[in-house]
Amino acid sequence: MNLPTAYRRLGWATGIDNLGTGAFTAAVPLLTVTVTSDPRLVSLVSAAAYLPWLLLSLPAGSLADRHDRAGLMWRAQAAQAVLVAVTAVLVACGAVGVPVLVVTAFGLGAGDVVFGTAAQAIVPDLVAKPLLARVNGRRQAITTITQQFAGPPLGSLLFGVAAALPFGLDAVSFAVSAVLVARLRRRPRGAPAHSAVREGLSWLLRHRLVRTLAVLLGVNTFCGQLVNATLVLLATQVVHLGARGYGVLLAGAALGSVAGGLVNARIVARIGSPPALVTALAVNAGAFAGIGLSPDAVLLGVFLAVNGFATTLWNVVTVGVRQQQVPSALLGRVTGVYRLLGWGLIPLGTLTGGLVAHGLGLRAPSLVAAAVRGLALVVAVPVLVRALRDQSSVDGRASSCRRIWRASSSRP
């Protein structure tokens, strides 16, 4: 079945946007370590990028249900284009320090909250539900190829030529993506303001499966940021990579995510959602331990790739579950609450990673993350399996009721 034109346009916008974001993602830590080598300050810049998910997820979800989602997306990207263009000028003038990077990271993160929440909510408006697993896998692959595979080497290469270049590329990518998204068909919403947050929160708290996934996502992202906050220091100071080598490392790590985006939908179809989710959690724990113990850049890249594959497997399953279970009129608000619970711990994980690295060494955050993820796996598996089993029973009863209704309504 062919994908609709509107979704293909969204796919192009996603790829172009994430190519610039990938270049920016590699350039920011490289620029930061030229300003400071203190792990706490390096992690502060990273934390600023994710703090908006804690502060703005709920209002962003409300906006995604009350207003045209495509309009929110292109306006957010236009604002991001202006912000990163200003940053590029400041970098070129040599007027950038940690405060400027913190402000830039926070502003771009705020745009990502609005764009990301609306983008997940708009997908079921563009494609039929049977295509969601395929579409989500493809979007994950596009994001990974551009943001993690192609973008970081390009960003590190441009950074080696002139520090401002990757920031300029990011500004252009935001602008082009905004133009593409602005051409999507408008769908006015108009949900009442007073019910926006309350209804999304109420729905999620009543839905055992989605609530369980949100809590697990919170643990996952906390552990992920323990590792990512000071990864640039681990790569440059422990395994002794330069700027270009760091970009190549990120690109190599992205291979696992690319592979995951392409094949994980098939894995889920073959083994089912519960085994896929448990496998993802277990592999992530092992990969974090491997990252912390890696003696060289090659093994570090391998374990990062394994982690990316497992993370993509988790994303393909959980995003599809949410898009299928949540009513379209509530999807923006529930996504906002879900991401508040699931991504709200990212700033804390980032700052904790900086403190752990400062106090215990640059390998320690990955080992702590592995231990926390392993403990979460032991605690969560029975709850997760029970929630998935209960939801399957509910879905089965609902499907039976629909078949009976259709049969009875077709009788003369």
Image (cartoon, rainbow, N blue to C red):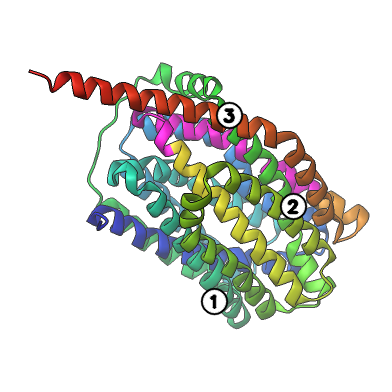
Q: Quadrant of residue 191?
A: top left
In the picture, which quadrant includes the N terminus? bottom left
Q: What residue is disc 2 on?
A: 285
Q: Can you tell which of label 1 and label 2 is closer to the viewer?
A: 2
Q: What residue is disc 1 on?
A: 154
Q: Residues within 10 Å of mark 1 (few under 14, many from 20)?
A: many
Asked whether 405 or 21 is in front, the reply is: 405
Asked whether 267 or 295 is in front, the reply is: 267
The Cα atoms of the two marked residues, 3 and 2, are separated by 22 Å
Q: Position of residue 238 (x, y in %)?
A: 84, 71
* Secondary element at image label 2: helix
Q: Is residue 236 magenta?
A: no
Q: Residue at x 70, y 40 (%)?
A: 219
The magenta segment = 323-352
Badge 1 or badge 2: first in the primary sequence: 1
Q: Position of residue 336 (x, y in %)?
A: 50, 34
Confirm or deny contact between disc 1 and disc 2 (CB under 8 A). Answer: no
Q: Amino acid at mark 3?
A: Ala
Q: What residue is disc 3 on?
A: 387
Q: Amino acid at mark 1?
A: Leu
Badge 3 or badge 1: first in the primary sequence: 1
Asked whether 6 or 411 is in front, the reply is: 411
Badge 3 or badge 2: first in the primary sequence: 2
Q: Position of residue 304 (x, y in %)?
A: 68, 64
Q: Can you tell which of label 3 and label 2 is closer to the viewer?
A: 3
Q: Can you tell which of label 3 and label 1 is closer to the viewer?
A: 3
Q: Residue at x 73, y 41 (%)?
A: 377
- Would residue 85 be visible to someone looking at this image? no
